[in-house]
Amino acid sequence: MRLPGDFKHAVESVLKILALLLFVLLIGATPLAVAQTTEPIVETPQVAGSLIRAPGWELVHAHCSGCHSITLVTSQRGERPFWKELIRWMQRTQNLWQFEPATEETILNYLATNYGAGRPQRRAPLAADLLPVAR
Amino acid sequence: MKRRTLLTSTLALGTFGSIRPVWASPAGVLPAYKDDLLVLNEKPINAETPAHLLDEELTSASHMFVRNNGLLPLSFDAHSWQVAIDGEACLHPRSFSLRDLKETFTWHELALQLECGGNGRSEFYPPASGNQWTTGAISCGLWGGVRLRDVLEVCGVADKAVYVGYYGTDRHLSGDPGKTVISRGVPVAKALQPETLLALELNGEPIPDLHGGPLRLVCGGYPASVSGKWVNRLVIRDRVHDGEKMGGDSYRIPCEAVAPGSEVTDEEMCIIESMPVRSLITYPQSGVHHPLDQSLVLRGHGWAGERAVASAVVSIDFGQTWLPATVNSPRNRLAWQRIQTNVRFKSRGYHEVWLKAVDDLGVAQPMVVPGWNPKGYLNNACHRIAVQVV
């Protein structure tokens, strides 16, 4: 039996906070250093991947970060059918659970709105990090 | 994007029973020696190499791209490692330890190019799902090991053999131990090529954990997903191997070209074999400032899957005119080839240098993104770098 995503996430969060506490006790680090070094490990909403903060992002984080990184979500682009098929594929083959219709609607709206396909290009300009920096 | 491993915090977390390699924390996705790579995905770990870090003749482990479909194995122990050979078309199934392999078979060292089938995926429109590789899912390391052919022949390859598939010890993302992460393979003819290795070493050292150690397949020139990592079983099949990621749209493209965005059924998809001709400018780094009065040295590599690169040209005017470059012979078949030349600019300002390689059958890299396919494979469009002439 699979735990509901939100509950599972809550349990994981508690475990991670316990781990953080143990870490502080063991290492005796300053609060500043702890904040800096453990930030990516303790996935509080403030640092949970880099999902765009728009309606529905909490649901996407709860359901999509169990198996893979949030980066795998934020690095994709596609219209609604693209995201729906990805979800169906994960449900068919990757052990993703079924969503309540309202949950799925929220997730699909969020993804199609915030991570849409963008504009057609046969070849884009070189990426910003590959361009000369003005001197 | 630099990631620094924070060993202590990860170990502290590990005391809560999560068994994982020390670099698997989000803070230090990669081991420190691979800090210069661009992380595309933290779980599963995927990272590509910036073009200018691929300038070495042989790719060092620190600059080798990382591709995973699942979680890393729990053990990389060379002393206890066994690889079983069986399958419908295997006459004498048996297992080998790594010591058996070294003592029984002749040792070979070959420079072999490995390129991810999805290298360049980020440029397709409509976008394709998966890791958004740009140009850096290519390497050419010096692989040491035994010929797969020698091993298979001892085990007996029946006349009915069609394919050789692999299984490895990586773990499914869902945590389901019953699920295979990836189990691909190659046609028997490719398995029996003298360059196809069951490798134990990379650049004279045991293969790093992250790159498939202690034992992996290396089938240069094919999508790198056929070069299975952490291999513990090989199957000589009497049919096309039907393991995980052999069907559907995984590592397959439409048998007949389709318009961008088309729906393609499974029956209309064909397995990718040889990768297409491609090249990279590895020196200078894109974005360089260069004085107008000096010629610019350009250096790179070209490769062409199962074929060789026959020639290469560069353009400094967006493809309007092309200048010849020198192409060296490969160190051995299926190794990449050094490309170099000098160019002189006629004016100051923003320029791009484009490099186009041509294979030994006269097939050249396209200047725009080639044929769309559902998963965004085989984008071999010519590499471009920016140069500010001052």
Image (cartoon, rainbow, N blue to C red):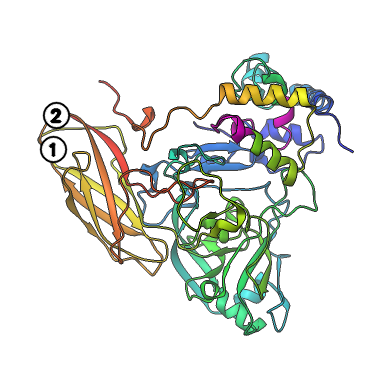
Q: Does the magenta portion include A64?
A: yes
Q: Position of residue A105 (x, y in %)?
A: 71, 24
Q: Position of residue B46 (x, y in %)?
A: 56, 42
In the image, A122 versus B229, the foreground residue is: A122
Q: Where does the C terminus of chain B fall, quadrant-wise?
A: top left
Residue ID at (72%, 55%):
B180
In the image, B214 versus B252, the foreground residue is: B252
- The three-letter code of the residue at mark 2 reads Arg
The reply to whether the C-beta atoms of the residues labelled 1 and 2 are less than 8 Å apart is yes
Q: Where are the magenta residues, as a range?
A: A62-83
Horizontal side of B320 relative to B55 (left or right) equals left
Q: CA distance from mark 1 to mark 2?
A: 8 Å
Decide: is A28 above or below B261: above
Classed neighbour count for the residue bearing mark 2: other residues with Cα under 10 Å, few (<14), some (14–19), many (≥20): some
Question: Hey, which quadrant is residue A82 in on the image?
Answer: top right
Q: Does the magenta portion include B143?
A: no
Residue ID at (83%, 26%):
A11
Q: Which residue is mark 1?
A: B345
- The three-letter code of the residue at mark 1 reads Phe
Residue ID at (75%, 32%):
B13
Classed neighbour count for the residue bearing mark 1: other residues with Cα under 10 Å, few (<14), some (14–19), many (≥20): some
Q: Which residue is mark 2?
A: B348
Horizontal side of A129 relative to A83 (left or right) equals left
Q: Position of residue B25 (x, y in %)?
A: 66, 35
Describe the element under mark 2 as helix, strand or loop: loop
Question: Hey, which quadrant is residue B26 in on the image?
Answer: top right
Residue ID at (72%, 36%):
B11
Q: Chain for mark 2? A: B
Describe the element under mark 1 as helix, strand or loop: loop
